[in-house]
Image (cartoon, rainbow, N blue to C red):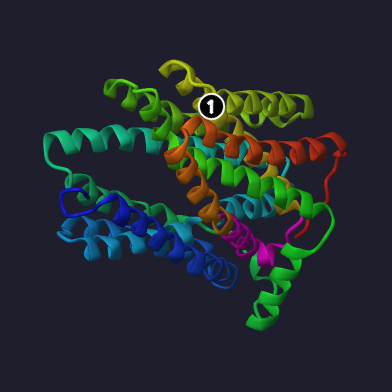
């Protein structure tokens, strides 16, 4: 990006551009997934990723790269809120219950984490051995390959039970479900808070490394650890489904967040970030299950995408505040924003788990 003319200001413009595309596309893509096909939406997402990678790979100017970044925003909007809906409805259709949701969605996160870690390492090797554009080009066959298992997958059909419902009625029902008061309100607050914390952690990870002058050689190790954490969370989340174990993950995550407000060694910061990423991923899966328990299948993907859109709307000003405080004071002081978000999300989550009864309501 630097080589083709980007500055700090235009990097900010790029982030705003693809975030804007996500805001515009996320909820409509969820509605499309509910009314048409969830695996079809994921295939369109893979195609958008191919287009994004190709445009960014060949770009020689800031405007052209921005177009590629906006296609990446389309990909992420199509991807967001779709896999968890598929896993939930598949379990409901195949088994008649979602008791194993954490186990199976945890497996999805394990594969996702393994892919992120291996592609991060491979991308670095490609950049070193060939050139920086090679990572974009090698993304294209990987994205195309993802279409094959999607085509072979028989998706659940619970969400198509009322295909004749007019679009306007579908949208009204979706927002009515999301905005209704009751148990869902607390769950949404927990989901949105955990999502915001995860976004801030991953977007600003390296600011902590810069603040403590971490040796460059450790950047790769730190990146691999934080990308591997969701995979570990996917493995342990079924074990952690009991209330006291979830409570332990909440406590560890809160302690790790507080650790990020203290200027310490490289390994201390890396450990805190990894524990927080693991905790956020595990409890997010638990939160997602309880959210889907409250959502009808026919609006599941759309409602999930609308919630993700709300998270992104809140993320933009919070990210700006984090960057401003980090720049004018320090990253460790800005870290108190993360502490506040995690505290709210985890406090609400603890309340949900503490009063939860066996046999949660399942909405089909």
Q: Which residue is mark 1?
A: 260
**Residue shown at the point (27%, 49%) measured from the top left:** 139
In the rendered image, the residue lying farthest to the left is: 130
Q: Nearer the viewer, residue 84 or 131?
A: 131
Residues packed near mark 1 inside 10 Å, few (<14), some (14 to 19) or many (20 plus): many
Q: Can see residue 112?
A: no
Magenta run includes residue 302: yes
**Location of residue 5 (image quadrant):** bottom left
Horizontal side of 245 relative to 201 (left or right) equals right
Q: Please state the horizontal and vertical placement of residue 103, each as a whole percent of the image.
A: 63, 36
| Part of the protein shown in magenta | 294-311
Q: Please state the horizontal and vertical placement of residue 150, each as a whole percent of the image.
A: 44, 56
Q: Is the residue 207 above or below the residue 141 in the image?
A: above
Q: Nearer the viewer, residue 42 or 267?
A: 267
Quadrant where the C terminus sits is bottom right
Q: Can see residue 250?
A: yes
Magenta run includes residue 229: no
Identify the secondary structure beneath mark 1.
loop
What is the magenta segment's predominant secondary structure?
A: helix
Horizontal side of 144 relative to 28 (left or right) equals left
**Residue shown at the point (20%, 51%) measured from the top left:** 137
Horizontal side of 58 relative to 157 (left or right) equals left
């Amino acid at each position: 990006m630097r080589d083709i003319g980007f500055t700090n200001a235009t990097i900010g413009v790029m982030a705003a551009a693809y975030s804007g595309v996500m805001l515009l596309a996320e909820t409509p893509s969820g509605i499309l997934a509910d009314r048409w096909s969830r695996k079809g939406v994921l295939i369109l997402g893979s195609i958008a990723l191919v287009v994004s990678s190709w445009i960014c790979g060949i770009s020689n100017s800031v405007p052209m790269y921005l177009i590629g970044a906006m296609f990446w925003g389309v990909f992420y909007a199509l991807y967001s809120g779709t896999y968890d809906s598929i896993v939930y409805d598949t379990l409901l259709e195949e088994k008649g219950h979602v008791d194993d949701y954490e186990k199976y969605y945890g497996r999805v996160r394990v594969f996702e984490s393994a892919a992120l870690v291996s592609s991060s390492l491979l991308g670095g090797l490609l950049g070193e051995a060939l050139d920086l554009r090679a990572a974009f080009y090698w993304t294209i066959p990987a994205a195309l390959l993802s279409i094959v298992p999607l085509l072979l997958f028989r998706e659940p059909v619970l969400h198509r039970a009322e295909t004749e419902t007019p679009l306007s009625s579908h949208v009204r029902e979706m927002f009515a479900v999301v905005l209704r008061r009751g148990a869902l309100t607390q769950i949404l607050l927990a989901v949105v808070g955990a999502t915001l914390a995860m976004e801030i952690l991953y977007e600003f990870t390296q600011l902590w490394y810069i603040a403590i002058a971490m040796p460059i050689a450790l950047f790769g190790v730190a990146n691999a650890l934080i990308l591997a954490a969701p995979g570990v969370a996917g493995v342990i989340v079924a074990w952690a489904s009991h209330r006291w174990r979830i409570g332990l993950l909440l406590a560890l995550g809160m302690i790790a967040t507080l650790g990020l407000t203290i200027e310490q060694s490289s390994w201390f910061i890396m450990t805190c970030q990894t524990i927080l990423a693991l905790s956020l991923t595990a409890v997010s899966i638990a939160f997602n299950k309880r959210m889907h328990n409250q959502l009808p299948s026919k609006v599941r993907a759309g409602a999930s995408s609308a919630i993700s859109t709300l998270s992104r709307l809140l993320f933009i000003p919070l990210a700006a505040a984090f960057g401003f405080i980090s720049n004018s004071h320090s990253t460790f002081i800005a870290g108190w924003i993360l502490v506040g978000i995690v505290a709210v999300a985890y406090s609400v989550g603890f309340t949900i788990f503490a009063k939860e009864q066996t046999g949660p309501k399942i909405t089909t």
